[in-house]
Amino acid sequence: MRFKSAKKDGFQVFAVAGVNTISFGIVASAAARKGLLGFAVERVDPKSGEKYFVYGMKVFPSVIPNPDESTRVSTFDHPIQSFVWDDFTAKDGRDYVYNFYPVRGKPKNLDHSAEPVTIDVKTEKLFTKGKHDIFFNRGVASSQAYVREFHNRKPDQIANPKERARALEWLSRSLDEALLAFIEQARPGDELFGCFYEFRYEPAAQALAKAAKNGVKVRLIVDAKDNSYTDKKGTFHEAFPRKENLAMLKTIKLPKKHYVLREMRANDIQHNKFMVLRRKGEALAAEVWTGSTNLSTGGVHGQTNVGHWVRDKDVAEAFCAYWTILQADPGAEDGQTSDGRAANKAFTKAVEELSPTLADDDEIAEGITPIFSPRAGIKMLDRYVGMLSDADSHACITLAFGVGAQFRESLLKNDNKSALTFLLLEKEDKPNPNSKKKDEWLPINSKNNVYKAFGAYLQDAAYQFARETNARMLEFNSHVAYIHSKFMLVDPLGTDPVVVTGSANFSEPSTRSNDENMIIVRGDRRVADIYFTEFNRLFFHYYYRSVVELTSRMRDDKPSTPKDAPQFLKEEPKEWLASYAPGKFKDKRVVMYAGMTL
């Protein structure tokens, strides 16, 4: 939901509320900015009877010259020096009142006499009976909060069972609860159709086995492709995820009648992670669970992921039809020639008949449009590229495996007048040193009105920041440690927002080679608001860490003065207000909120 305050003394506050995250933008006139040191933010929660000034970590160096990792301060004494701010601690389905008090004066003699700018906000409910429920895990094992709460310990090394469960829940943020709830809603005689790339998260696997034992007609497609190989050094690499998936099927003792193994086209990935529910006696399927979350501990608790629960019969039936194609293990065996080409062509044709390629934005209907892969060619990928590049105001995308050639070529044509675009990446965007075309590689940056963040963590215990961990060091994820979600937002705060989400990585292989699914949701502001606030949370969490990593790489010495340390507040208004000059990145973000459709 979206909100705005009344104008007061040259200030106006705008807010976008998701489930647990609320994003704010503050417009301030030139007169209102005069002498402004920041904002003391007070949150009022009538339901719980709470009223307090929210906490921060940045401090005035003249007041607290030597903070440490335990330092937490009230924004009443150390105000927020920003015109954009997020509350990541909101509860779902809750009414809040936020009071933004302009703070002036000096750090040791603050002036709180200005009247606050007040805005009423209501968050979305996490579990509903509506068309869409959306569940994001925390995705930030590399965070000060995990250091503070769990001291960087691996959950399986936390001796106390309750504390271990709390750590896992903190990381999953109800994603696991929702995943299990989708399975456990099935009753005897209902049908559950599942299609999984990774099938090694025991709580979900056991829930499916229990459902089958209780009379639910469970039918699964599990990846078992033999992609094992021996590298140039003679080291043998086991097939993945075949080995782990087969082991889990054995562990849960699921009878063979409940699953089929996806083994054809071993060089491509059976990358789906969806389930379909059809109620007993119903002709059509009713609900779909989709998104980016593999059934693995790392998928649920580690890297960024989303589970998207859709209650729509047309969409569910389309997924069911796609499942029916896949259950036959279609496509060619490796090494087949003419017969293999025919088998693959028949497979892609059957998939495309379920979800024809969209030629332009006008063909994207309001509501939900499923898109399935593999497809002949990359026209659907080109459509995604066009959607991102043709945004009117702003666009956001997660790219777990880098910026593809099509996206780079398109975005390089942008300039400062193009839509503000955010790229959230697993790794830093840079040329591959082993590529023959590395000399042709061109960076995308602020000149194209594009801003990038990549997975990173704070490695130095500088000032009050403690050394962080990440999902790889917690032994959740060995390959993709940070950004695994796959979604794109086009003008999410506009009148006609578009959300694309699912299993595909916005790449050539995910379009024409792999088994994949996506849904395009058009015109649903609730869906767009939830995805936008979560993207905002993740992007700026990693954007800060990306900047710290790049800065430390460019200099041998560590910051030694408050002026050099980004975690200290500025003691003079002009020092922080300068970054909000018209045309600068931070000001562009304020403009984005001020221009949103309410």
Image (cartoon, rainbow, N blue to C red):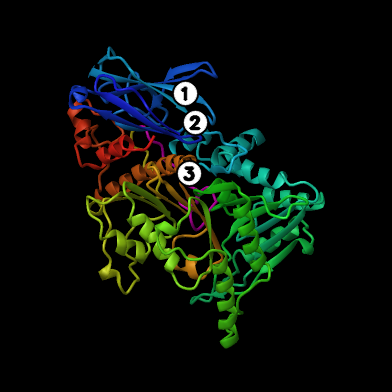
Residue 482 lies in the magenta stretch = yes
Mark 3 touches mark 2? (CB < 8 Å)? no
Distance from Cα at disc 1 to Cα at disc 2: 8 Å
Q: Is residue 394 visible?
A: yes
Q: Which of the 4 image quarters holds residue 458? A: top left
Question: Label 1 is placed on what type of residue?
Answer: Tyr
In terms of depth relative to the viewer, which is nearer, 345 or 212? 345
Badge nearest the viewer, 3 or 2: 3
Q: Which residues are magenta?
A: 464-485
Residue 434 lies in the magenta stretch = no
Mark 1 touches mark 2? (CB < 8 Å)? yes
Distance from Cα at disc 3 to Cα at disc 2: 16 Å
User: Would you say the magenta stretch is mainly helix, strand or loop?
Assistant: loop
Q: Which circle's residue, 1 or 3, is located before the other in the chain?
A: 1
Q: How many C-alpha atoms fall within 10 Å of the one at disc 1: few (<14), some, or many (≥20)?
A: many
Q: Is residue 59 visible?
A: no
Q: How many C-alpha atoms fall within 10 Å of the one at disc 2: few (<14), some, or many (≥20)?
A: many
Distance from Cα at disc 1 to Cα at disc 3: 23 Å
Q: Secondary structure at mark 3?
A: loop
What residue is disc 3 on? 524
What residue is disc 1 on? 96
Q: Secondary structure at mark 2?
A: loop
In terms of depth relative to the viewer, which is nearer, 182 or 233? 182
Lateral position of residue 470 relative to residue 515, left or right? left
Q: Which circle's residue, 1 or 2, is located before the other in the chain?
A: 1
What residue is disc 2 on? 123
Q: How many C-alpha atoms fall within 10 Å of the one at disc 3: few (<14), some, or many (≥20)?
A: some
Lateral position of residue 527 relative to residue 459, left or right? right
Q: Residue at x 26, y 69 (%)?
A: 440
Quadrant for the N terminus in the image: top left
